[in-house]
Amino acid sequence: MRPAISSLLLSLSIIFIPGVVQRVEAANVAQGRHLAQLYCARCHAIDKVSPSPLRIAPPFRDLHNRYPVETLEEALAEGIVTGHPTMPQFRFEPDQISDFILFLKSLE
């Protein structure tokens, strides 16, 4: 077997070991939480119990009741321009979008 293929198979086997996947996903959720804290927590509740600091900003835990949170992927990539009047415009990179969506799903 060629070295590149054996390295790939080893990498894939590590990824699919139970526990490793959970740790990787937990790290991604933590990254998503960090993004929410950095960009969103000033207005939105980013946990499962607190009210949003800005009354008109929906708590993130309720977003999945309004629409599938995956529908935010395009807006996060292109730059969300509006949501509420004081919402700043920002754009996420693809890996940040994945982490952010995983974080939102962790609140469901």
Image (spheres, rainbow, N blue to C red):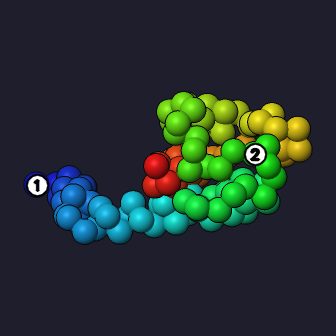
Kind of residue sitting beneath label 1: Met
Residue at coordinates 21% horizontally, 58% vertically from top-left?
Answer: 16
Q: Answer whether labels 1 and 2 touch (C-beta < 8 Å).
A: no
Q: Which mark is residue 57?
A: 2
Which class describes the residues within 10 Å of circle 1: few (<14), some (14-19), or many (20+)? few
Across and down, in percent, residue 71 comes to 55, 31
Identify the element where label 1 is drawn: loop
Identify the element where label 2 is drawn: loop
**Can residue 34 be seen by looking at this rendering?**
yes
Residue indicated by mark 1: 1
Q: Nearer the viewer, residue 25 or 12?
A: 25
Across and down, in percent, residue 42 comes to 79, 60
Kind of residue sitting beneath label 2: Ala
Is 68 rendered above or below residue 38?
Answer: above
Which class describes the residues within 10 Å of circle 2: few (<14), some (14-19), or many (20+)? many
**Can residue 3 be seen by looking at this rendering?**
no
